[in-house]
Amino acid sequence: MSTAINTEHLAYMYPGVDNTPGVAVFEDLNLQIQKGEFVAILGSNGCGKSTLAKHFNAILLPCGGKAFVCGMDTADADLLIKIRRTVGMVFQNPDNQIVSNVVEEDVAFGPENLGVAAPMIRLRVDKALKQVGMYEFREHAPHLLSGGQKQRIAIAGVIAMEPECIVLDEPTAMLDPRGRREVMQTVRQLNEQNGITVILITHHMDEAAQAQRVIVLDKGNIALDGTPQQVFSQVEKLHEMGLAAPETVELCWELNKEGFELPLEKLTTEECAQTLFEALK
């Protein structure tokens, strides 16, 4: 498996204002994400999640060390367009990414700016809308759609540019539970069926539990890195960093303090219910 994202001794500092010192976010961050992975990145506010994500398609450039996208150095200005074709970004508020008054025109915006020929744009737009389950809304006005539908349109606009990797920076933060489910189902399908590398920045533990790999940032460092079961079973460490495990794990952890001996790797409601049933038989 080849590497999609690679940082080597990454350092970044936000400059100070009015002669105040700058704020260091990373000083020596080393990370590898393989092509085809679905990775969730967690951490408390201010830990550097969004700052790291912006290094993945050269919105931000390292102050020290290197960031590579499919082997391309993000600091190489000649590679900027190619890097941004390779890594697409989806942000919190879909309204900030929707630029047209018709859904299919909005999805076509990215390929048009890449210079894709018109017949191919038509194919890409239809394919992208079908992939996110929004083809039937192609002639609708985006502002009349729900939050979850808008976010799926924003995702379609990114995948119409055919990136190898998609970075989603808290894409469900402004959505209701239904919208969150719609977006997460779309994200999983893109990874599982299309092989797109997915990097999900989130503060929802149940969303992170759906990834193949979970990375927890703390004070600019990687504090935990492993499968969801490996990471979320370390409840005490998560609490120390101001985070919580998924509710199912927290329930089993609380019961263990009362004398139970329940495993802490059961992440879904069904798995947790089965574990409790077996323990109480």
Image: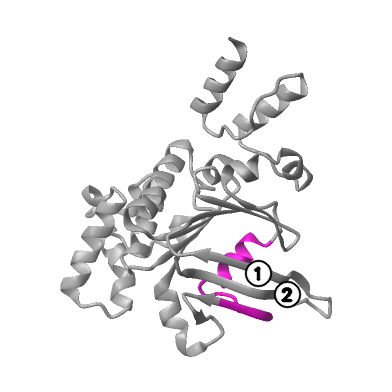
Magenta stretch encompasses residue 132? no
Q: Is residue 149 left or right of residue 205?
A: left
Outermost residue toward the front? 1
- Quick check: is 65 in the magenta stretch? yes
Residue drawn 60% across the image and 30% down it:
248
Judge by depth and name the residue closer to the eye, 233 or 166: 233
Q: Is residue 194 above or below residue 73?
A: above
Q: Position of residue 141 (x, y in %)?
A: 29, 53
Find the residue positioned furthest to the right: 20
Q: Which residues are magenta?
A: 48-67
- Give the farthest residue toward the bottom: 78
Decide which of tag 1 and tag 2 comes sooner along the chain: 2
Would you say 162 lies left or right of 268 here?
A: left
Q: Which residue is mark 2?
A: 13
SS class, disc 1: strand
Residue 212 place in picture, x, y as percent:
50, 49
Looking at the image, is mark 1 or mark 2 nearer the viewer?
1
The amino acid type of the residue labelled 1 equals Asn
Q: Quadrant of the N terminus?
A: bottom left
Q: Residue furthest left?
A: 119
Q: Which residue is mark 1?
A: 30
Crowd around label 1: few <14 · some 14–19 · many ≥20 (10 Å): some
Give the vertical position of 81 relative to 89 (above or below): below
Q: Amino acid at mark 2?
A: Met
Q: Quadrant of the C terminus?
A: top right
| Residue lying at 52% horizontally and 32% vertically, measured from the top left | 268
Q: What is the distance, in whole Å, between disc 1 and disc 2 at their CAs?
A: 16 Å
**Marks 1 and 2 close (CB-CB < 8 Å):** no
Q: Could you classify mark 2 by the number of other residues whose Cα lies within 10 Å: few (under 14), some (14-19), or many (20 or more)?
A: some
* Residue 273 versus residue 52 in the image, above or below: above
